[in-house]
Amino acid sequence: MLTTLVPEDYTYLDWAATAPLCEAAAQAMRPYLEPGRAHLQLGMNANSLHAPGRAAFEAMEIARHQIAADLGASRPNEIVFTSGATEADNAALAGIAQAQSAKLARGRQKDFVPRVIVSEVEHEAVLEPARRLASAGFEVVRIKPDRRGFVTPETLAAALDAQTVLVSVQMANSEVGSVQPIAALAQMAHECGALFHTDATQALGKITLDMGKLGVDAASFSAHKIGGPKGVGALYLKARTPFSAQMLGGGQEGGRRSTTQNVCGIVGFAAALHEAVANAEVESERLRELRDWLYARLTDIKRVRPTVLVDTGATDYLPNIVHVLVKGYESETLVLRLDMMGFGVSGGSACASHSLEPSHVLRSMGISADDAYGALRVSIGTMTTRDDLERFANALEEILN
């Protein structure tokens, strides 16, 4: 029996951690959740040859075509379904680095040491696989962002060399919201003979994504950030990109990710993404106005200052994230006290929420440990209103006073 119940009037302001399931995804998945014989119509194993299996396979491929179109992929088979962005990041780092290094090593001297470059503001789903690559003999270089949270082309250029096999830089940061110049960074990597991966999890549904125009070789996505179900995501893998499969077995997903596919989740993912893409321009503008208002309101409160300076209307930061530093308080204290007052916010990435260490993202940007301990992230979404933010700001001010 559940012991934690969320009050009806609770205000959720942690959309960067996960978004509530949207109606479009719920409607798309509903037929797959019917029990008994009704489940035969759509919910069976998409790899079976009989009629129920073929029906599931057809539904999955329709979803794959839709996702490919919404992401600007040139071919549907460039979309590899995964259990989420963490798996997609792990697969991209290990799978591409291993395959590309083996390809480049042929004909080179025996002392060839393949290099992988990642930024210091990456999610742990990129940093941890990079550490494993380092233990496997790769040279791993971590490049710093500037004080505003951006990885500059000049910084990447200084780290690239002829032995670089892969560069991974996230599209948008989950804490401060900085949107990286991915197209320029990818072009620079390609000119040096390296492949380029981006974790686009936070950018999905918030900014326009076109894989062809970005010029990346791989990108990671997760459904639950845009109102889709948890436990499903995708790895965009550009055609002919060298890749060594990390999940071996029955050869599903073109041999790139073996396991029985989550057709219900995939269909929900496609529906949520299509709705997010269709509404992205109008919704992003609405969120941007709320973001700018909240930054102005919070920085009027004593002890609160913005972590990064976001200009009004700025598009180089995500429209849905506000990040501030609160002097004299720890994030955990603020999060718990705000929770008691009916507001759900976070101190940073939910994937590291149980860590007592200051955010590695903030530290890499040059923010002191003392200041980083007082970080507060407010992230908004489709159900957030101006009234929600006004009540939140008043609650925070009450706590600090």
Image (cartoon, grey):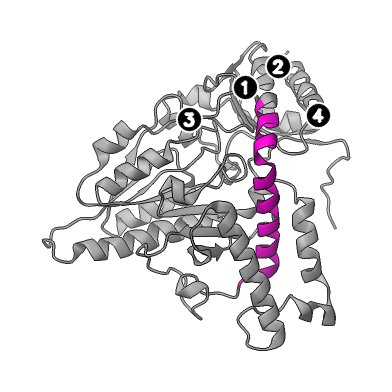
Query: What residue is drawn where x is 79% and y is 32%?
Result: 340
- Badge number at residue 362: 3
Determine whether label 1 and label 2 are within 8 Å by CB: yes
Examine the rendered structure and indicate whether residue 286 appears above or below residue 53: above
Query: What residue is drawn where x is 76% and y is 64%?
Result: 29
In the picture of the structure, the residue carrying the numbered disc 4 is 341
Q: Earlier in the sequence, mark 1 or mark 4?
A: 1
Q: Position of residue 16 (x, y in %)?
A: 63, 40
Q: Earlier in the sequence, mark 2 or mark 4?
A: 4
Query: What residue is drawn where x is 45% and y is 36%?
Result: 180
Q: Is residue 262 visible?
A: no
Q: Which residues are magenta?
A: 261-288
Q: Amino acid type of disc 3?
A: Leu
Q: Is residue 189 left or right of residue 37?
A: left
In the picture of the structure, the residue carrying the numbered disc 1 is 329
Q: Tell me how far mark 2 sits from mark 4, CA to CA.
A: 13 Å
Residue 259 placement: quadrant? bottom right
Q: Tell me how far mark 1 sits from mark 4, CA to CA.
A: 17 Å
The local secondary structure at tag 2 comes to helix
Q: Tell me how far mark 1 sits from mark 2, CA to CA.
A: 9 Å
Q: Tell me how far mark 3 sits from mark 4, CA to CA.
A: 27 Å
Examine the rendered structure and indicate whether residue 112 appears above or below residue 370: below
The local secondary structure at tag 3 comes to helix
Residue 61 placement: quadrant? bottom right
Q: Amino acid type of disc 2?
A: Leu
Q: Is residue 361 visible?
A: yes
Q: Position of residue 100 (x, y in %)?
A: 29, 61
Q: Tell me how far mark 3 sits from mark 1, CA to CA.
A: 16 Å
Examine the rendered structure and indicate whether residue 300 appears above or below residue 2: above
Q: Amino acid type of disc 4?
A: Met
Q: Tell me how far mark 3 sits from mark 2, CA to CA.
A: 22 Å
